Amino acid sequence: MSRLQQAFSEAKAEGRGALIIYLCAGDPSLAATRDIVWAIEEAGADLVELGVPYSDPVADGPTIQAAAKRALKGGARVAGVLECVAQIRERSQIPLVIMSSVSPLFRFGLDRFATEAAAAGLDGVLLADLPPEESGEWRELAEANHLSTVFLVSPATPPARIKLAADATTGFVYAVSRAGVTGARTELPPQLPEMIARIREVTDKPVAVGFGVSTHDHVRSVWQVADGAIVGSAVVKVIAEAGENPAPAAAAFVRSLRGG
C-alpha cells in the first residue's frame, strides 16, 4: 500500500477524512518549508502538497501568488524543491505530493523530474493545467517511477470528463469546491455534496476537496462528504504573518483545523 493510500485508509479507520495541507515550497525559504512539514505532521496533518512556485499560475489566488513571488525571489526552483523533499524524508514518512503548473517541470525535463522526484521520496504529482486527454506521456513516466497521479475536477466539469479525470488518477481526485481561484472563503458552496456525489458515481478512488477550505468547521463539513480536506491559502497566510520561524505558528493552525 502506498503512503497516499495508507493516509486515507488510516483516516477512514478513525472515522474522519484526511487533513491535507498545501504549502508554497520556498516560502519563506526551502529550509523553512522542510521545518514546517516536520512541525505540521506532528500537529496532525495527514498529507502535504508542496506547490512549485511559478510566475504565471492559472488557478492561484492573491495569497498563494504572493507566496510564489517570495519563494522565487528567494531562489526556489524545481531542483531545490526536490532537495527539500529529500531532506523531509530524512525524518518523515508523511505522504508528499507536488502541485505544479506543467511549464516548470517541462523546462526541468519531465523524464528527469519523474526519476529525481521518485529518488527524493515524493509520492505523487498534480499538474494543475495538464488536461487528462493530453496526459499520456506523463502518466507513463509517473507509473514507471511509482508516482501517483492527481487530476482536478470542478463544479463545471461534465460527467464524461469527471470520469476521464478519475480514470487518469491513481492517487486521489482533487475536487475544486467552487469556480475561480484559490483563496480563503467564509462559507463552503452549498452544492458541494451534490458535486461529490457526481464524482462518487464514476469512481471509488479517494476524493479530496480544496479551494476555499479554511477553518475547522469547513474541514469537518468536507469530511462528511469526501475523503480529504485540503487547506492552502489560510495556512500560507499564517506562514506569511509569522516571520522568519513560521513552523510553530503553522503547527498551531493545523492543530486548530483538527480541533485540538
Image: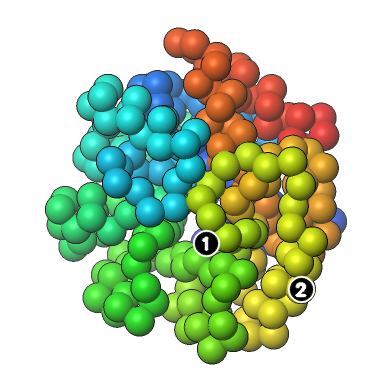
- Which of the image's four quarters has the C terminus? top right
Left-right relation of 259 to 211: right
The colour scheme applied to this rendered structure is rainbow
The residue lying at 28 percent from left, 58 percent from top is 102
On residue 194, which mark appears? Answer: 2
The residue lying at 18 percent from left, 62 percent from top is 111
Neighbourhood count class around disc 1 (C-alpha, 10 Å): few under 14, some 14–19, many 20 upward: few
* Residue under pointer 1: 2
Quarter residue 173 falls in: bottom right
Is label 2 in a helix, a strand or a loop?
A: helix
* Residue 163: % across, % down: 54, 84
Q: Are marks 1 and 2 in contact (CB under 8 Å)?
A: no
* Residue 255: % across, % down: 73, 29
- Residue nearest the viewer, comparing 226 with 153: 153
Quarter residue 28 falls in: top left
Q: Is residue 13 visible?
A: no
Q: Mark 1 or mark 2: which comes first in sequence?
A: 1
The residue lying at 52 percent from left, 61 percent from top is 2
Q: Is residue 15 above or below residue 186?
A: below
Q: Is residue 207 above or below residue 63?
A: below
Numbered-mark total? 2
**Residue type at the position of mark 2:** Glu
* Residue 52: % across, % down: 34, 43
Q: In the image, which is nearer the foreground, mark 1 or mark 2?
A: 2
* Residue 235: % across, % down: 59, 32
- Residue nearest the viewer, comparing 114 with 108: 108
Q: Residue furthest bottom?
A: 160
